[in-house]
Image (cartoon, rainbow, N blue to C red):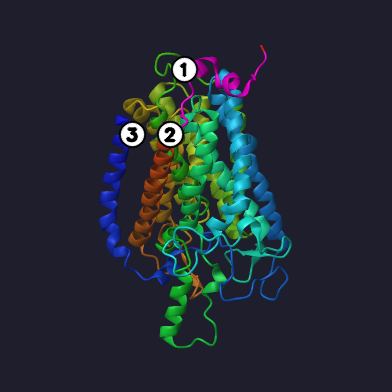
Amino acid sequence: MKKLFAVFTLLSMLSGMIVPVFAEEAAAPASAAVATAAPAAAPAAAAPAAAPAPKCGDKGFDCNKGDVSWMMTSTAFVLLMTVPGLALFYSGMVRNKNALSTVMQSFAIFCVVAILWVIYGYSAAFTAGHDGNALAPFIGSLDKFFMSGDDPTTAVAATFSKGQYIPDFVYCMFQLTFAAITVALICGGFAERFKFSAMIIFSILWFTFAYLPISHMVWYWDGPDAYTVPKEITDPAKIKEYLDGVAGHAGFLFQKGAIDFAGGTVVHINAGIAALIAALMLGPRKGFGKVSMAPHSLMMTAIGTGLLWMGWFGFNAGSALEATGAAGLAFFNTLFGTAVAGVVWTLVEWIIKGKPSLLGICSGIVAGLVAITPAAGYVGVGGAMIICAVAAVICFFAVTKIKVWLKYDDALDAFGVHCVGGIIGAIGTGIFVNPALGGQGVWDYVANKTADFVASDQIVSQLWAVGVSLAWSAFVAFVILFILKKTIGIRASDEAQEEGLDLADHGERAYQH
């Protein structure tokens, strides 16, 4: 508990330093978000609220077959990231008596979250909150509960180009895969010691109260067509009122101007800080620091790394929502930046430890993938290289030095790679999106051009996203785990850990020998 208290104290200090800087920024009009959100800043789930529900094939609502094909392919790629990519990556890093249970966690979480996403998750994350509701900037409505009101073949979701749409059911499934892998990532922090029943309950509650609000705050808006002022509105005051109303439908952090191409805050910071809280509240594994807990199959981890990297092209390039140059840039950066991180991690490890390791290069690859995620469609070649190189160095020391120094048992380095790498990527995005540094800039959908870029404003917007994600996810994880700990318990017994969770929880063995 002392370590947990120290973490919350650190978060409080961070918030104390950041909030005064934000105070003046918060007074900006909501319409300012239009000029600080790039074309791929956030997914859109609807056309302007005042317009009738559009359908694929309607005039002005083009559903390009190439875009639709790309999005279905990307969705399958992101599925591959979790099942079996993440499952194998994590499973190889635990002891053989827990290999099967680790795979089971990823598979079970994916299936459970998929069901909840269709029932209420998609609606809560990607619909506008009801006008006048104080919670509207933080969570959506239940208007699409169980996909109600949607025609499966004709309902549409907006992309980042005016007049271009994709089927809503396709977009829903694409975002489903993001939600599922985010929850599954947390398993890296509590591997080998979380009771399966409590883990499932935690996953359901954290998904509901942490993932859905953060995804809505960062990614929800009304779509680009909403920022086209109707011709009948000509009075400047009325135009401002209209645009303020449209911007006011967006999520809280979107309104602040935060940009996150594919999930640096929503996925990696969100899951990584929850993993740290879980690791601290569960306590270290039995025998931690006294018995060997070396990975049982680095070959399995290597295979998982390869599947993650391949699937990540759907994760990042798919987040462009169209088969365009933005998708191509994200694809490029996901390959190039990740390779940079793999090389840098390996070199640092070689210098510090005397030998380069397979686990090291796999860790570097994942750190690079994490860091480039929020920046993928925004930054140029130089930005991608610097972000990923810096992430490799800092994440290396986070998992090899800081974790050892603080003596917390983040079993598979979910915090050290995903949270730390996500923070580097989120802030790096704010720096290198700058056109003066080779970035794409941010887009003003009203003027239909790249907006004038103010570097300090964008960095402040990114800090808003980092700070809110850290604080809210940590708080939600702590409350859920505290309640579960005081009721059904969260930690597997010493006997179960000694036997291995494969047999203790599931009555099966990963290997028969």
Crowd rating for badge 3 (residues with CA inside 10 Å; few <14, some 14–19, many 20+)? some
Give the residue displayed 36% in from the left and 55% down from the top: 464
Residue 444 percent coordinates (x, y): 47, 70
**Front label number (2 vs 1):** 1
**Is 215 situated left or right of 72 in this image?**
left
Placement of 391 over or under 352, stated as above or below: below
Which amino acid, by three-letter code, is at mark 3?
Answer: Leu
Separation of marks 2 and 1 at Cα, in angstroms:
18 Å
> Would you name the residue on which mark 2 appears?
278
Which amino acid, by three-letter code, is at mark 1?
Answer: Asp
Highlighted range, magenta: 484-512
Give the residue displayed 32% in from the left and 31% down from the top: 3
Q: Earlier in the sequence, mark 2 or mark 3?
A: 3
Q: Is residue 384 visible?
A: no
Q: Earlier in the sequence, mark 2 or mark 1?
A: 2
Separation of marks 2 and 3 at Cα, in angstroms:
10 Å
The reply to whether the C-beta atoms of the residues labelled 1 and 3 are less than 8 Å apart is no
> Would you name the residue on which mark 1 appears?
494
**Is 174 situated left or right of 221 in this image?**
right
Q: Earlier in the sequence, mark 1 or mark 3?
A: 3
Placement of 442 over or under 498, stated as above or below: below
Residue 111 percent coordinates (x, y): 63, 40
